[in-house]
Amino acid sequence: MDFFKFISEVMTKEITPYLWSAVIVLLAAWKYFDLKKHVENVRRELNKSVDLIKELKTRSDNPCEVFESINEKLEKSKLIGHQWKEFYETLIFEDQDGVVRIRNSYNAEDFFSPSYLLGAKINLRFYKSMPNFLTGLGILGTFMGLAAGIYLAGINLSSPDQANQALKNLLQGASLAFITSIVGLFLSMVFSGMEKKLMSGFEEAREKWVTELDGYLNRVTTEQISKDLLEESRQQTSYFSQFAEQVVFQLTEALEKTMPKALDENVTAPLTKALDALQSSVEDLARNQQRTNEDTLHQIVEKFSETITGAAGKEMQEFASTVKALSEQVDNQIKQIVKQQEEVHKQTESSVTALAETFEKGSKDLQEKVGESVNQILSGLSLTVEKMSSVLNESTANISRELNETSTVFKEAVGGLTGSIKDVRSILTDTKDMVEYLDQVVASVRRAHTGLENVVNSIDSASQSIRAVAEENKQVAIVSQQGMSQLTNALEDFSRQQEVMESAWAQYESRFKHLDRSLAEAFQQIEQGLEKYTQMVNDFITSLDGHTGNITSKLAGSVEELNESIEELNESIERLVKP
């Protein structure tokens, strides 16, 4: 009880409210000047940074070098160095036509906010609540004084005089106690006003710094990136379409120019000449045989006539009549032989005509199949271009790659297609070699007039060579089918990779506010997607090789038809050789 009485007497003394008020004043002054010191330091640093940006705008040197020098100065700043390092990591240095442009992916406001600039150094929430704290201290002093006065008045009520004195002390203490509330409320308003003015000056300097920095840098947004990617994808689609049309046109033109002419020059013309020579040889052989038989019979008749003329008698006449009958029989046999030779000649002509018609039909079929193959290549390239166009249109929302990397990938794709064209040219060269080989076969047929047996042997050897070429072409067709299956598997892998990229883009959008942390991972995923895209272009080249293999297989079919025609020629010649 004595302790509470002592405290109450101290609280009700006349000097106590003034001491309490002095404590409130000193606390308010201390916190205000502490806040002012930190705010003024940051404001001066921001003003210096604004001067650096203004100096950067006036200089005509290399922007990157000047900006790097300013970066070194700002990184060394103790007040805004950390915020500047975080902001610098989000900058993008872009080289366009030899001019370096600095672009920012985040607003400067996000890094140089009051909470970032001052929050790490002082407790802003405490300073904002300081007016309430001062008011609370004043009211606390008032109520403590009232409580002490009431306590003392309660223990001195034994007599009326003591009661009057206690009431007088209570009223006097209450009037003095309210001084602390007045001081607390007044200092609360003063501190709040001065704090608002101080923060207003700081906010003005900060806003000026943010405005100057945003004005110097070029803002990068996802909408702008999507627009640039859409334009780039449209341009790539146009380039791919033009390239595919040029490839198909050049391939078609090359086939139309080289294939018919090569077949006419290297196959049709030599084979026709060889068959004409063979036909003339057979006709000469028939005429020589007929002429030899007639001369022999005339000689026999003349000798018999001379012998019969020198003889006499009825026996000789009878013998002459017998010889005459024999001569008539021989004439009939000669006529039959001539008739048989004419039939053989007709059969030979019909065989040669059938062979020519078969070869002409085979040439037409070959041209038609080559045309169909070219149309298939055209349709295949069109479908591939459409698929690539759709893939590029879908990828505009998923890829945030720089234009230089896209150009590099496109150049690699063009190089791959150029290699494919070289492969097609090599295949055409192989076809030309095969045609030259057929020309050699025809040359061997041309030497058939030396003997029918040599002709048959040459045609047999040529048939075996053609069969070997046909077998090789069949193997090429099998390999082409395997390439088509690999292309299908590659397209399935690309579809799965597309789904992975879509999920990665969704994660990227969800974490877009933290781009400085997740941008590296997103770029790695985009790089993997572009590698798959390069794989798809290589698969497209494989598809083109597959179409070329189809052309080769169809050419093998035409060669097989030519082989059948040659076999028919062998059978006709064998029938001619048989007696």
Image (cartoon, rainbow, N blue to C red):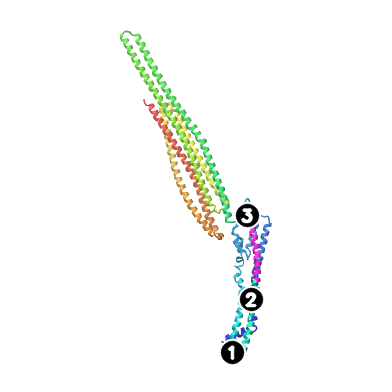
Mark 1 surroundings: few (<14), some (14-19) or many (≥20) residues within 10 A? some
Q: Nearer the viewer, residue 297 or 417?
A: 417
| Magenta extent | 193-217
Residue found farthest to the left: 315
Please tell me which residue is depicted at 47% across the width and 47% down the height of the picture.
487
Vertical position of residue 181 compared to residue 579: above or below = below
Vertical position of residue 302 compared to residue 179: above or below = above
Name the N-terminal-most of marks 1 and 3.
3
Q: SS class of the residue under badge 2?
A: helix
The spot of residue 566 in percent (x, y) is 42, 32
Kind of residue indicated by mark 1: Leu
Please tell me which residue is depicted at 48% across the width and 51% down the height of the picture.
495
Mark 2 surroundings: few (<14), some (14-19) or many (≥20) residues within 10 A? many
Name the N-terminal-most of marks 2 and 3.
3
- Estimate the spatial distance between the alpha carbons at disc 1 and disc 2, rounded to whole Å: 35 Å
Residue at image mark 2? 185
Residue at image mark 1? 157
Kind of residue indicated by mark 2: Leu
Q: Quadrant of the C terminus?
A: top left
- Estimate the spatial distance between the alpha carbons at disc 2 and disc 3, rounded to whole Å: 55 Å
Question: What secondary structure is the magenta-colored segment mainly?
Answer: helix
Q: What numbered label is drawn on residue 101?
A: 3
